[in-house]
Amino acid sequence: MEIRPILSVLMRSKTAPLLVAVQVALSLAILANAVYIVNLRQASSSRPSGLADEASMITITARPVKRQPHDEALAQQKRDVEILRALPGVKAATWISQMPMSRSGSNSGFALDRKQARQSIIMSTFFAPPGAIDVLGLKLLEGRDITADDMVEYDAEKDTPNKTWPRAIILTRAAAEQLFPGSSAIGKTLYYGTGDDASEMRVIGVVERLQTVVAETGPKAENSAIIPLAMDLPYPKYAIRAEPGQRDRLMKDAESAMRDPANPRVIFARSSEEDRNNRYRNERSLAWMLIGVSALLLLVTASGIVGMTMLRVAQRRKQIGVRRALGARRRDIVRYFVTENLLVSTAGIVIGLVLAIALNQLLVSVLELPKLPIAYLGVGALALWALGIVAVMGPAWRAASIPPAEATRSV
Amino acid sequence: MEWMRYLEVVSNDTRLSVWLAFGFLLLCLVNTTGLLLAKFSARASEVGVRRALGATQGAIFRQFLVEAGVVGLAGGIVGLALSAAALFVIGKQARSLSVVTQMDWPMLGLTFVLAIAAALIAGLLPTWRARPRSRRRCS
């Protein structure tokens, strides 16, 4: 190949090729990192929540307009569950204090030792009755579910957590491994809160997975606990498992079945799919923005390559004519410009790889992003090479169509 | 506390977007420089003629810089229309967002100035390169 003459031409007029190389470098640096972030977001938004078959899961929130007395509220809870279970198309139903990814609920600190000043872990606390884990479809890995004997009724008016508090607790595997690494959590003790007043609890079961209400981006997303506590919740919730294909109808039916003119409540149904969509809305919009910007980036870089090649063609009309007159084929002219562009974009890609790693380092240190895998750099480099070849083709063909007669013209 | 952490994640995304925007601006700056360079160097003979007819170096410099500025102005106006359209679309998505999807005039002015400044900066190098080194370029 005629690389030597191309190189010496490039060396003589550096500015335009340098600008193109810088563009390629910047695009590669941004592209590799952007695509990586999109993939990270994608992976985070498709993490399993622990709920089996999210498509058939409904949460109903029924907030009384006027706060009911403790006993009444608990009786209402039981009644509501009966109403929901009786509805056609309902496979199973339970009351529960909160649902994963729903972005509304409570969390609490737990300690391994009473003497600790700081809690060992913060967990999302799901208050639920026996059988709730079956309704949600959680996988019990060890131990047992809650029984009726474990249940404790808590009256916020007169009880305090240090006197009246459940003795049993179910952890997720993530929480169990964090608290009791290397051994089974079953039977181990844990304290709700810290200090002398902390209530002692015993781990009775471990479920595979249950995401918190926030579903954080990191491993904290699975720090959840299920506690056999019945209380008058400000936002009483019910989880319903619908028969296949019945969900949308059931969401309406359940709302109207629970409505009671004697006891006005704000009742609304939401599917777990909606919860997931709402939770990851920001992630999705960022991903789309990154995709959009990446596409524009490539477009701009392509336009830069087209512009530079057109300039170089315009500057060398006469020389191209001479070459054609001396017997060079159209192919040879095209090959010249493609090779020239490949040299320039390769230089840009080399700088770009360094820039991409530097940019990633910055993102790692400031935004706590994981390190960029090498594969992204490889794919990004290939993409920019391909882009360069495609972009240069148009102007190169136009150069090839310069007639040999151009050699005879003097201007 | 969890909620705070969650909010922090959101602001990280915002920071990421800002960086991305500046990275993109930088790329466009280099791109515009390249394109203006192509445009101006194709007109070397015009510069020669103007010089031969008595234009000073400064006048030529100004002419090209003004051209770059006009490109920036045009880009700014188109960008303004685009951002108004984008704001409208985002505002339509949710009523709660319409509070933040108002045109912020000082911000708008800043972007406009930025657009023209960027074009001028991008135009500097091509303008410098377009200056005639001698009068024989008019050929």
Image (cartoon, coloured by chain):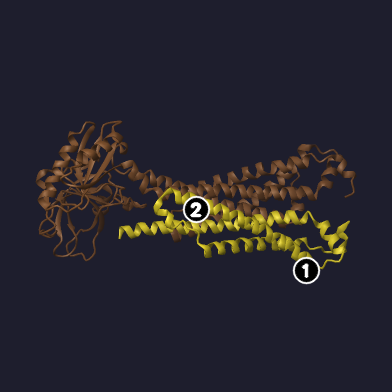
Q: Which chain is yellow?
A: B
Reading the image, the residue beneath label 2 is B87
**Residue A85 at what x, y percent from top left?**
18, 36
Tell me if residue B8 can be seen.
Answer: yes
Q: Local crowd at mark 1 within 10 Å, few (<14), some, or many (≥20)?
A: few
Q: Tag 1, which secondary structure?
A: helix
- Label ID, residue B58: 1
Locate the N terminus of chain A by quadrant.
top right
Disc 2 is attached to a residue of which chain? Answer: B
Nearest the camera: A213 or A369? A213
> Which amino acid type is marked by label 1?
Gly
> Which amino acid type is marked by label 2?
Leu
CA gap, disc 2 and disc 1: 42 Å
Quarter assignment of residue A57 = top left
Q: Tag 2, which secondary structure?
A: helix
State left or right for residue B7 relative to residue A239. right
Nearest the camera: A332 or B96? B96
State left or right for residue A102 relative to residue B49. left
Disc 1 is attached to a residue of which chain? Answer: B
**Residue A262 at what x, y percent from top left?**
15, 45
* Badge 2 or badge 1: first in the primary sequence: 1
Quarter assignment of residue A334 = top right
Q: Which chain is brown?
A: A
Q: Nearer the viewer, mark 2 or mark 1?
A: 2
**Residue B46 at what x, y percent from top left?**
82, 57
**Residue B76 at what x, y percent from top left?**
61, 57
Nearest the camera: A260 or A177? A260
Q: Residue at x 18, y 58 (%)?
A: A192
Q: Local crowd at mark 2 within 10 Å, few (<14), some, or many (≥20)?
A: some
